Image (cartoon, rainbow, N blue to C red):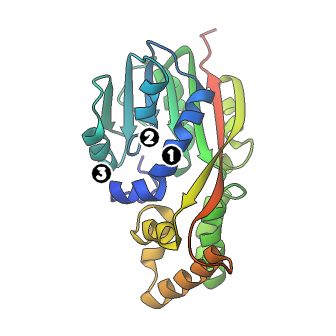
Amino acid sequence: MPSTFHASSADAYEQLMGRWSRQLAPLLIGFAGVADGEQVLDVGCGTGSLTFALPRAANVAAVTGLDFAPPYVEHARAANTDPRIAIQQGDACAMPFDTGAFDRAIAMLSLQFIPEVERAVAEMRRIVRPGGTVAAAVWETYGGMPANRMFWDIAGVLDPDAIKQRARMFFNPITQPGGLGALWRRSGLRDVSETMLLVRMDYANFDDYWEPIASGEGSLGQYLTRLNQAARAALHERVRAAYLGGAADGARSFAAVALACRGVVPHSA
């Protein structure tokens, strides 16, 4: 099932999100757990932030990264130097793995972009052995992402069409507190636990914030590139003013909250 995340350039993704994913990965691994000798699947691995962090957390037997976007798969493969790691292209809603093949499956910042997310979680449960763990994290898009809210709130004032896209992103049920837990329970997972993980998005200056969006990557970039030149210029100036906040251009730091959930695959009755 194709993702709703616009993926065209791995380098642009690294600037837009990869640098923050690398901060989040150790926190999610700490919550999701990983043990020596395990077979672990990274669902929606992107450019490999979580995939490459897993062998640093434990002496795993193998890590498989799965992503739908060929540019990200190619980038992760080129960056890989660990023979225990394999990166492949595939659909999270129809995974090419045997039932019970993994000890643990983790999805970091990918589930909110999968239209049939219940199918994806069902697949994660299927490919994890009984007693194994299924875990995920998503950004809390409405209340926990001020760097993105700044862009979308201003876009919504300037463009009524942006309000619809903004609402789809902000109010996806799994990006709200309790949403992942409810999904895990509907999927039949047991011993469900939820938490919040906090990182900071540190920008050197406004260009460091804006240029990854202007590249066209991701939901923000896809929206921006659809605008005509005048509309892009107007949005740029207003977002710049909001970023500056009346002070000189320079470094800014934004909190970013991820909602995380884990659960255990039950043994057959």
Q: Would residue 176 appear left or right of 89 to someone viewing this image? A: right
Q: Quadrant of residue 159?
A: bottom right
Tag 3: Cα neighbours inside 10 Å, few (<14), some, or many (≥20)? Answer: some
Give the spatial CA distance, label 2 vs label 1: 6 Å
Q: Residues within 10 Å of mark 2 (few under 14, many from 20)?
A: many
Q: Badge 1 is on which residue?
A: 21
Amino acid type assigned to the residue bearing label 3 in the image: Pro
**Which corner quadrant holds the C terminus?**
top right
Specify which label sits upstream in the sequence, 3 or 1. 1
Query: In the picture provided, is 207 more to the left or to the right than 153?
Result: left
- Image x and y of residue 191, in percent: 71, 21
Label 2 close to label 1 by CB (< 8 Å): yes
Badge 2 or badge 3: first in the primary sequence: 2
The residue lying toward the viewer, choosing from 269 and 86, is: 86
Q: Is residue 142 left or right of residue 73?
A: right
Q: Residue at x 62, y 76 (%)?
A: 244
Picture residue at 42% right of the left edge, 60% below the top? 6
Query: Quick one: 171 or 193, which is closer to the camera?
Result: 193
Which residue, given by chain and number where applicable, does mark 2 sit on? Answer: 49
**How many marks are shown on the rendered structure?**
3
> Is 169 drawn above or below residue 93 in the view shown?
below
- Position in image of residue 198 (x %, y %): 66, 45
In the picture of the structure, the residue carrying the numbered disc 3 is 71
Taking 262 as reference, is 58 above or below it? above
